[in-house]
Image (cartoon, rainbow, N blue to C red):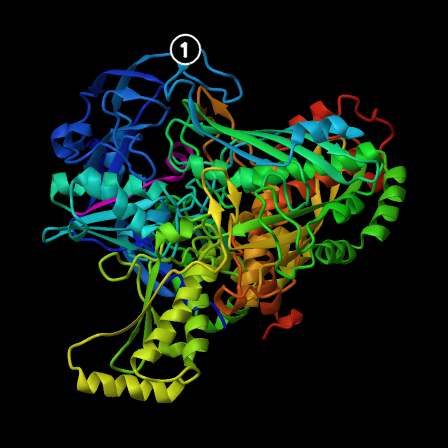
Amino acid sequence: MLRREGLSKLTGRERYVDDLPVDDVLWGATVRSPEPRGRIAEIRYSPTVDWSEFVIVDHTDIPGRNAVYLIEYDQPALAPGYVRHVHEPVLLLAHPSREAVRRAAREVEVIVEPDPPVLDFRIDPGPPLVQYGVDNVLKRLSILKGDVERALSAAPIVVEGVYETGAQEHVYLETQGMLAYLDGDVLVIKGSMQCPYYVLKALKPALDRTEAGIRVIQTPTGGGFGGKEEFPSMVALHAGLLALKSGRPVKLIYDRPEDMVATTKRHPSRIRHRTGVDEDGRLLAQDIEVVMDGGAYVTLTPVVLSRSMIHAAGPYSCDNVRILGRAMFTNSVPFGAFRGFGNPQAHFALERHMDVIAHTLGMDPAELRRINLIRDGQTTATGQVIRDGVDRIRNLDRALELSGVERRRREHWLFNAEHRYLRRGIGMAAFYHGAGFTGRGEVMLDSRVQVEGRADGRAEVLCASVEMGQGQITAFVQLAAARLHYDPDDILIAEPDTQRVPDSGPTVGSRTVMVVGRLVERACDDLRRRLGLGEGLGGDELKRAIADWHASHPGERLLGSARYEPPPGIAWDEEHYRGDAYGAFGWAAQVAEVEVDLRTYEVQVRDFVSVQDVGTVINPTLARGQVQGGVAQGISWALLEHCAFQNGALANGQLTNYLIPTSADLPPIRVEFSEVPYEHGAQGAKGIGELPLVGSAPAVLNAVAVAVGRQPTEIPLTPERLMALLDDPVPPAKRRESDL
Amino acid sequence: MSNEQRDRLPISFTLNDQPMRVEIDPAERLLDVLRYRLGLTGTKEGCAEGECGACTVLLDGLPVDSCLVPAYQVRGRRVETVESLDAESLATYHASGATQCGACTPGVVMTASWIVRHPEVLGRGSVRELMAGNLCRCTGYDGIIEGIEDAIPDRGGA
């Protein structure tokens, strides 16, 4: 099936929040802190502006609790006199002219008496720098399996390594934006978001309103990647405050620089590995320390750390594992959700380290992985027994075969011998990603979905999952149509509107098709059951039954519904981080081929192969697009996307100097699926959205390591960093045609 | 504010094959005139500095970033926006998965339509190279490139 809203997007008819025509609208703007930490001493309004034209909101205008609530109440909606990161919101302005409000925002000066900031998460802070708890640790976790110390001291070979990853900006092409207005007593929020019910949850305590007093509606969302998981709650709250104070509709639309400097990014990390192996390459002990930069407020950091640590030992079987982790407070813009949610950091370190181990042992890195990849019946670091029928070794071998690794290695050897400045190499990564919320998370979410049989016989899916490009609408149309034996045109998907759809949880964590899609199927079954129809019945028979029901129940609604039920046999010990962390894992192997130019230190990815087991593929075109897009983000995180922080603020907050790849920077990304159905996912599907990104950076860096014969440990591997790594560059010699 | 008092400037140009007359602020960008004065919101702002191509329109048949074009410069010229494209001409992009979130899409299809109308430009570079002025964060570009190649007459397109 083609993408349901595809033509609407291709013809430009799709209306995003900034495209909505609104009468009498005011435009909002945000005045932000210029300092990373300190007391707000004064706010100066330039006399060149007639401030009587403006609506001005500060923290005293917040009717409820001054916080953007998700996990903790620590992050103020507007700084109440003290700031903890550069670009922290201090004041809000609104004016009928979009240009005037943006100019005016620059005419307000926030004077801060600075206190010393914490800017490096890797250094333990001294007492004057402690701003969270007793040691700035936002969250500390540990995972223990077997006896690591004993196994390490008994191991014949111990390989150590420290790996670092930088922040990453989402660069969804549609910036953050919200529209807020009053409809009678109800505050309506419309905008770009992944999680309508998170916005509702944040607005209730801050605006001191009940659920009935706030209506959150998602508008078509131009990309999210995690960047519209928690941050939209802030934008919505700001737009809402301006609308409440002015009594007029307010649009608050970030421009690109504001979006880049002020919103969340991927957590920077430093991960240390100490691994015991025997001469054959068998993993005997994995001792891992994960440290993350959480930024100035808690946001989702504890959960990101958790997912990172659960995956840190990788898709390998090892009897002795110790994973210790902590996330640190810093006076930096808060780090938050980003596709992969901590797992890309974990797998960058792990899969780079696996190649370092192979290099140390003089082994083929593929063979090292084959020996250690989890077989059915073996356990992960948390002790979860994997028994899903996926052949992880075959998937790795298939990726290698598709890449032509044997032939390529011979060709590269000749190529590298012939060329003075160009070096080619091939690298791989094996990896996995748990789909859905961790542990009992899905139980706590208690997601619900409804399917309504409408008087005209069509069926409408009511849920809070959103379309942000990933294909949720199309997938749900397909799932419902298949379940009800309907033509896809007879399936409607409701606009996500908190006053109309039930809470089916956030659109995150690769959970939409697997978890919520399964609820769509069960709600379809329930609809049929309410009409007394047996399983397997549908199509015209169902349509007639729905029409008959409406004839005998005028004015009533016919709703099938489903509520989340955990798969049987899943047990998770939250206190000790033991047991079944996820209902299902997606598994993948990827192979990258690169060419390094030793003159410019540029790395070009020449070929990329991705073999993914995501269970049943619901829509091949959309699934392929998810993998290709995820790989592209992983490649560019590895090579291009450098967040340059100065005094805790992003110094390169423009697309001119923060690079994301163009079409010319990427190779064709070749995708193959191995489809082992997961019995508790919709039609056998597992999560897909995050997995492909997880193993892209290490595959690329492993290829670079082969090409240049050094071991890079830090991403992004910018030309400057590669130059520093190759401190002994190939001396310049006579230029050859073949190098050009 | 003083800038609001500036004289309005009436301009005439051809917009999507129709004559158009509109009063603008002399400092206005073509992007804002299209979006906020004429209600043609298909054209998107992605970066406002000519990096992303989301605001691409055709000016006298050539792709330009409308965020970088002062609106007065289109006087007497021909502007085509995404609203001028019909669904039929977009079928190959639909089939290949060229659109995901859709925010870059209007710009992408405008550049693409220039390539498809002038396949001779492929002598200057591949589709992959010619599309490098339009950033897409969702697709990894393969779906876009496939859709364009399928739309080019000599390459299996109609």
Secondary structure under the numbered disc 1 in the rendered image: helix
Mark 1, Cα crowd under 10 Å, few <14 / some 14-19 / many 20+, is few
Location of residue A30 in the rendering, given as x and y in whole percent from the top left corner? 28, 33
- Write the residue at 18% across / 76% down: A556
Location of residue A644 in the rendering, given as x and y in whole percent from the top left corner? 51, 27
In-front residue for pair A701/A552: A552
| Residue A253 among magenta residues | yes
Q: What kind of residue is marked 1? A: Pro
Q: Identify whether A82 is placed above or below B31.
A: above
The quadrant in which residue A358 appears is top right
In-front residue for pair A270/A261: A270
Q: Identify whether B151 is placed above or below A45.
A: below
Q: Is residue B46 visible in this depiction of the protein?
A: yes
Quarter of the image containing the C terminus of chain A? Answer: top right
Toward the left, the furthest residue is A184
Which chain does tag 1 point to? A
Location of residue A643 in the rendering, given as x and y in whole percent from the top left corner? 51, 31
Q: Is residue A442 left or right of residue A678?
A: left
Location of residue A656 in the rendering, given as x and y in whole percent from the top left corner? 51, 35
- Write the residue at 53% across / 64% down: A685
| Residue A40 among magenta residues | no
The quadrant in which residue A730 appears is top right
Magenta segment range? A249-262
Q: Is residue B96 visible in this depiction of the protein?
A: no
In-front residue for pair A381/A181: A381
Mark 1 sits on what residue?
Answer: A127
The quadrant in which residue A450 appears is bottom left
Q: Identify whether A239 is placed above or below A735.
A: below
